[in-house]
Image (cartoon, rainbow, N blue to C red):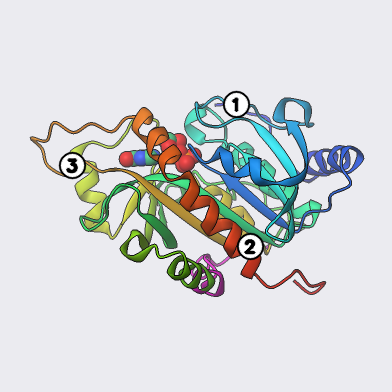
Amino acid sequence: MEGKTLGYEQCEQAVTWLRDHSQHRPSVGIVLGSGHSALADQVIKADIFSYADIPHFPRSTVPGHVGRLVLGELGGHTCVVMQGRFHMYEGYSANTVVFPVRVMKLLGVHTLLLTNAAGGLNPEYNVGDIMLVKDHIFLPGLAAHGPLVGPNDERFGPRFPSTSDAYDPELRAIARAVAKELKFGQRLREGVYVMEGGPAFESVAECRMLKLMGGDAVGMSTVPEVHVARHCGIRVFAISLITNLAVLEFDSPQRATHAEVLETGQRSAANIQQLIINLLTCMPPPTPSD
Ligand SMILES: O=P(O)(O)O[C@H]1O[C@H](CO)[C@@H](O)[C@H]1O
């Protein structure tokens, strides 16, 4: 496990560097998961930075995660877009995984839109469905392997934040209306995302357990970012693209693969992009009190 703690001062240094290198002052953050990188190509007046050039930023190591931060205009908002995220299974501590979200906070971001790829646990789900995340089960977090473990920095938020209100109901309602306009029909779902540590895909018995627990989709990311975003008062919206179906039968020949995850991501890119851009367009413009 990589061990350097990235705190408030390191966030400030990254923010100073970004403000020196870009005129954009983002109020919306976007995190693009496996296979979703192309959304960043829609950003207008884009300033594009490799993670390698930004002070203290980790490096992306997972195929499908380009490793660039894009600042510019999207859907009428000034946005900062992560073209690729960090995962604990890459060997990064939870603290490192969430560093960019804290940087976003200090940049002035008040709303965070997260995307991920996930395996469908709910038997009604199909590959290509888009699930609005209404809640989560944070398996590493329940065992104190989350980003808020350790000394609490009150400049970010309180020691004991609530997570029962993590996923903003108003943004989900706007997304439902947008999906209706886009005629997504049954492809639009709303459910519970389970985060497991990875990098191995789940066994059949594990998939069965996660489904029994109340999970609708399973992945290896997102919830650490949600925890720190809510900790520092950022409004959160998250979607999972169902890229594959969890294997729920012991004698099934089906296997999850990252190649399938990326393929589904490419096939569904247009839908994800339309949903996010239209959501941004309908989102109330930022106000000083947000
Ligand atoms: O959650 P994102 O980053 O979208 O990626 C998902 O896809 C990868 C597995 O194929 C894992 O990283 C899983 O978390």
Disc 3 marks which amino acid?
Ala
Residue 190 visible at all? no
Q: Position of residue 67 (x, y in %)?
A: 63, 30
Quarter of the image where the N terminus is located: top right
Q: Residues within 10 Å of mark 2 (few under 14, many from 20)?
A: many
Provide the major secondary structure of the magenta segment.
Answer: loop
The residue pinned by badge 1 equals 2
Question: Which residue is tagged 3?
Answer: 205
Chain part drawn in magenta: 158-173
Q: Of callouts 3 and 2, which one flags the residue occurring earlier in the amino acid sequence?
A: 3
Front residue of 186/115: it is: 186
User: What residue is pinned by disc 2?
Assistant: 280
Query: Quick check: 190 left or right of 9?
Result: left
- The percent coordinates of residue 64 (x first, y second) are 51, 31
Q: Is residue 8 magenta?
A: no
Residue at left 55%, top 24%? 61
